[in-house]
Image: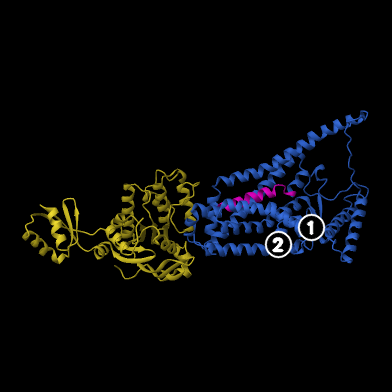
Chain colours: A yellow, B blue
């Protein structure tokens, strides 16, 4: 991970009508990474994103874009930001192409070919000349993404970007965002409550709940830190194996013919030897990477929350 | 206001694509055309027939149930002059006696009317024995009708309603539909965005007034003849008369009516930012203009303090046409207060727009 963060968020706080929505949030976002902000509805993801794109005022704290403070240089900074916030709200009376062409007013240095480039990037060629009132949600999402990509942003902020997309669209979106980060060094911030999707897309994630950033790190690190290491065991007598673990106070979970057990990597060898000595016939024993969703559920369960 | 030019251009390109834009422009053109058509029918077709029937009826012996028309005979210029002088003397007496019945507006109007009449007599535009009424009553019956109607700006309330609707839709409507978010994240300051929307509306209003003016002039010329735009019009300000060619007077009134819209539209902008509802903004703005303003104007005749409210100074063109409506006001006083209110409304709207989350 490079040392120089592109976006530095320091002690960010948002208070609305005496209610603190975001508590002391600090975070660094780096060039070339896809960062996922994960949390249930109402956790503060959209509020954080709104502060990052200027839709919502910061109550306390600072945001920096490459050492430029948002407070003093925001119009200049916005030239480098592309964003979709909440729903893809589009003017219903202008065709997608015209909207893209008109939006070029804000970026006089863009080459004329840029509009066609972004249309082809989001695969909207077939519908871009129609007005958005005839678009499906997925098509609106694609056009909103094209608008966000228009200025060749260095910081791309997408709030629930896969809403309304079909599985093929989600896959294309994932590949596109990975490509932007890896090939064009774009910093991508994505928020979602669909954790499986974030696990597949993000380099790092931040878990946010009730306005607090609970954990930040790589998906695998976070999962392991919260859920520990797991192992799936397939044996001749799974019911007996469950009783065996239960009698010894070992955490386990029956999953069809498998028994899932928490186990430190250093102890795997001892555990398997112990089971064979106890007369179990083992057919398979495989490590199981922790699932982000389970980890997150566990974490917010500890905090007394629920995901909606 | 960083990025003002960019956001103004974007707003203009975008808003010209709205159906409302074209529909309102067509209506602004058509209304005066229809109005002139109706006037033409009434004055050139219906009225001669009516007069013909009346004349043939007069030859018949008057009997029970016969309608008798009392034809109004306008006073001569000399008689009108005497009447105005007596009105002025009466008002001056009330003023000297510090009577509560004294009306400064009445005095100023009478002085202006007298100045116009004296000017016309002095320059031979009328003779003392000619029938004479104060300006506005006999405009329909001369060759310059097209120019005079265009100068009168007959559809101004309607055009104002169109401009209010346009402004409410592009500000409050965009709050409601969420499209304002995509605008605010573009590289332009919020102040620039709001200023661009306000100036877009003024440009749209200018086009509406132009369409109305052209519609008025073209249909008027077609129906009533080309007339002479160089023929003199006499106005008075502060009791002093001055002459303007009819065509130029029309342009001056056009400008005054346009400038008079700055303040009420600034108030609409504030309401749009405050209410974030297009329907609410339109309803409140038009209610204030159509009900609130006339009400305050009437009350201001009795409550002197109300002359400082914005409603009294909404239309500067009244000082050149129908006269002064409230005591202790004049065109300069109104212009200064209108400017002050415009600045206050714009500043408040801008402050609120920057302060609130979207």
Let me know if residue B225 appears in the view.
yes
Q: Tags 2 and 1 in contact by the CB under 8 Å rule?
A: no
Q: Position of residue B268 (x, y in %)?
A: 62, 56
Q: Residue at x 76, y 61 (%)?
A: B331
Identify the subunit bearing mark 2: B
- Mark 2 vs mark 1: which is more N-terminal? 2
Q: Position of residue A38 (x, y in %)?
A: 34, 60
Q: Would you identify the image quadrant in which residue A149 lies?
A: bottom left
Where is mark 2, residue-wise? B309
As helix, strand or loop, the secondary structure at mark 2 comes to loop
- Compute the Cα span from label 2 to label 1: 16 Å
Q: Residue at x 67, y 65 (%)?
A: B340
Let me know if residue A131 appears in the view.
no
* Image depth: mark 2 or mark 1 in front: 2
Q: Which mark is residue A69?
A: none
**Is residue B163 in the magenta section?**
yes
Q: Nearer the viewer, residue A249 or B163?
A: A249
Q: Residue furthest top?
A: B60
Q: Position of residue A258 (x, y in %)?
A: 16, 53
Crowd rating for badge 2 (residues with CA inside 10 Å; few <14, some 14–19, many 20+): some
Identify the subunit bearing mark 1: B
Q: Which mark is residue B324?
A: 1
Q: Is residue B150 above or below residue B255?
A: above
Q: Residue at x 85, y 62 (%)?
A: B102
Q: Position of residue B168 (x, y in %)?
A: 58, 53
Magenta segment's dominant SS is helix
As helix, strand or loop, the secondary structure at mark 1 comes to loop
Compared across the picture, whether B301 is left or right of B68 comes to left
Q: Give the residues in magenta.
A: B152-169
Q: Nearer the viewer, residue A150 or B184?
A: B184
**Is residue A115 in the magenta section?**
no
Compared across the picture, whether B183 is left or right of B25 comes to left
């Amino acid at each position: 991970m490079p040392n120089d963060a592109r976006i530095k968020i320091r002690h960010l706080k948002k208070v609305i009508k005496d209610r603190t929505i975001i508590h002391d949030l600090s975070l660094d976002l780096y060039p070339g990474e896809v960062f996922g902000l994960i949390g249930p509805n109402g956790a503060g993801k959209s509020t954080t994103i709104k502060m990052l794109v200027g839709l919502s005022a910061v109550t306390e704290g600072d945001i920096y874009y490459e050492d430029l403070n948002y407070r003093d240089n925001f119009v200049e900074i916005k030239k480098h930001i592309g964003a979709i916030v909440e729903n893809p709200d589009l003017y219903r009376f202008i065709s997608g192409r015209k909207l893209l062409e008109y939006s070029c007013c804000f970026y006089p240095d863009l080459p004329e070919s840029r509009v066609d480039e972004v249309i082809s990037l989001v695969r909207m060629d077939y519908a871009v000349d129609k007005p958005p009132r005839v678009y499906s949600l997925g098509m609106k999402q694609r056009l909103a993404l094209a608008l966000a990509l228009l200025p060749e942003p260095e910081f791309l902020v997408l709030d629930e970007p896969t809403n309304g997309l079909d599985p093929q669209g989600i896959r294309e979106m994932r590949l596109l965002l990975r490509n932007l980060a890896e090939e064009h060094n774009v910093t991508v911030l994505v928020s979602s409550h669909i954790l499986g999707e974030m696990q597949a897309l993000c380099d790092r994630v931040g878990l946010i709940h009730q306005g607090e950033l609970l954990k930040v790190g790589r998906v695998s690190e976070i999962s392991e830190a919260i859920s520990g290491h797991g192992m799936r065991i397939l044996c001749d007598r799974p019911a007996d194996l469950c009783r065996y673990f239960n009698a010894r106070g070992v955490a386990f979970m029956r999953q069809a013919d498998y028994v899932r057990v928490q186990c430190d990597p250093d102890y795997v060898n001892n555990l398997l030897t112990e089971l064979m000595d106890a007369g179990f016939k083992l057919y398979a024993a495989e490590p199981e990477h922790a699932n982000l969703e389970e980890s997150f559920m566990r974490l917010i369960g500890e905090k007394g929350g629920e995901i909606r | 206001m960083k990025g003002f030019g960019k956001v103004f251009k974007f707003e203009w390109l975008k808003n010209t694509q709205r159906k409302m834009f074209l529909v309102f422009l067509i209506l602004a053109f058509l209304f005066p055309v229809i109005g002139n058509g109706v006037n033409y029918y009434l004055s050139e077709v219906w009225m001669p027939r009516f007069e013909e029937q009346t004349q043939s009826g007069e030859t018949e012996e008057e009997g029970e149930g016969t309608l008798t028309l009392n034809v109004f005979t306008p006073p001569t210029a000399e008689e009108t002059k005497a009447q105005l002088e007596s009105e002025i003397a009466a008002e001056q007496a009330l003023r000297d006696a510090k009577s509560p019945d004294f009306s400064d507006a009445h005095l100023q109007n009478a002085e202006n009317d007298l100045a116009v009449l004296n000017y016309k007599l002095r320059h031979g535009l009328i003779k003392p024995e000619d029938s004479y009424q104060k300006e506005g009553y006999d405009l329909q019956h001369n060759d310059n009708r097209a120019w005079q109607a265009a100068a009168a700006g007959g559809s101004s309330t309607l055009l104002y309603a169109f401009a209010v609707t346009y402004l409410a839709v592009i500000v409050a409507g965009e709050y409601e539909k969420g499209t304002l978010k995509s605008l605010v994240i573009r590289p332009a300051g919020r102040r620039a965005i709001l200023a661009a929307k306000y100036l877009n509306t003024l440009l749209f209003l200018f086009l509406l007034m132009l369409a109305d003016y052209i519609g008025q002039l073209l249909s008027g010329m077609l129906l009533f003849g080309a007339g002479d735009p160089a023929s003199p019009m006499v106005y008075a300000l502060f009791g002093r008369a001055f002459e303007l060619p009819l065509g130029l007077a029309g342009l001056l009134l056009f400008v005054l009516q346009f400038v008079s819209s700055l303040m009420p539209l600034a108030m609409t902008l504030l309401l749009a930012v405050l209410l974030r509802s297009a329907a609410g903004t339109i309803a409140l703005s038009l209610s204030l203009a159509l009900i609130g303003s006339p009400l305050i104007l009437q009350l201001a005749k009795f409550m002197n303090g109300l002359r400082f409210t914005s409603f009294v100074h909404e239309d500067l063109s009244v000082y050149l046409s129908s006269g002064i409506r409230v005591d202790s006001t004049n065109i300069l006083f109104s212009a200064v207060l209108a400017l002050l209110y415009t600045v206050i409304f714009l500043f408040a709207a801008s402050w609120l727009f920057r302060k609130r989350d979207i």
